[in-house]
Image (cartoon, rainbow, N blue to C red):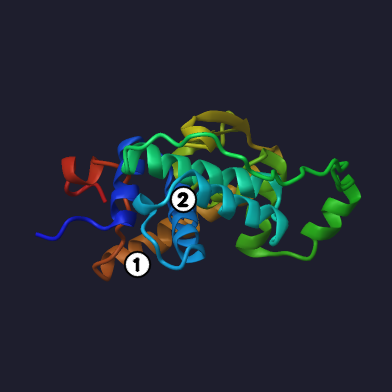
Amino acid sequence: MDPPKLIERLCRELRTRHYSRRTEQAYSSWVQRFVHFHQGRHPDEMGEREINEFLTHLAVKLEVAASTQTQALSALLFLYRYVLGRDIGQLHVVRAKKPTRLPVVLTCDEVRAVLAQMEGDTWLMASLLYGSGLRLSECIGLRIQDADLERGEILVRHGKGGKDRVTMLPNALKGPLAEQTQRARFVLRQDQAAGWGRIALPDAIERKYLNAA
């Protein structure tokens, strides 16, 4: 059997430590860009100097944001520490500057004007993002059982940092969300009748409960 490739090993280590899939995708992308920047050299053949060059290139040539450079650094440190088993020495990186800007906040009238241009699922999702403070990925992954219409609460599972939290459900969205729930159940019944209607289950649940999906 061939040994697992570098990206496969990286993903395995990330999953072992329960990192999110989005982090897994981001870290994999940064490792691939790092290798491409150094003309395909294997990271095991490189070290502090090459990491410094890559991160400095991001800040000086590509002018990436400070948060972007920090994410790239975190990906490479994880790669060397947990996949290659090496500790990185002193890094002399030109850090990307984090600009000081005032946040742009829409007024209530501006929000109403934006939402007035939407309809259907798009309107409901945008309204939830604004009214409940959900992130886009949290809204997309929202499950029926996590929306308590009676108490006016939404349970966000595995949010940023893998943490759960409870947020409010605006009264104005209870009716539309209930209607969306009924539409979703109707589509589910149609899918099941056609032999579909399965969903992806997290972690080891699919192996433990074979019919749960």
Give the amino acid type for the residue marked by disc 2 in the picture.
Tyr
Residue at 34 percent of width and 50 percent of height? 44
Left or right: 169 in relation to 144: right
Residue at 24 percent of width and 68 percent of height? 195
Tag 2 secondary structure: helix
Residue at 69 percent of width and 38 percent of height? 171
Give the amino acid type for the residue marked by disc 1 in the picture.
Gln
Q: Which quadrant: the N terminus?
A: bottom left
Q: Is residue 210 visible?
A: yes
Q: Give the CA separation, mark 1 to mark 2.
A: 38 Å
The residue at which mark 1 appears reads as: 190
Left or right: 208 in relation to 27: left
Residue at 84 percent of width and 53 percent of height? 112
Q: Assess whether mark 2 and mark 1 are in contact (beta carbons under 8 angstroms).
A: no
Q: Earlier in the sequence, mark 1 or mark 2?
A: 2
Left or right: 112 in relation to 15: right
User: Is residue 146 depicted above or below 76 in this figure?
Assistant: above
Tag 1 secondary structure: helix
Front residue of 73 and 135: 73
User: Is residue 186 depicted above or below 201 in this figure?
Assistant: below
> Badge 2: how crowded within 10 Å, few (<14), some, or many (20+)?
many
Percent x, y of residue 25? 45, 54
Residue lying furthest left in this view? 1
Q: Quadrant of residue 168?
A: top right
The residue at which mark 2 appears reads as: 27
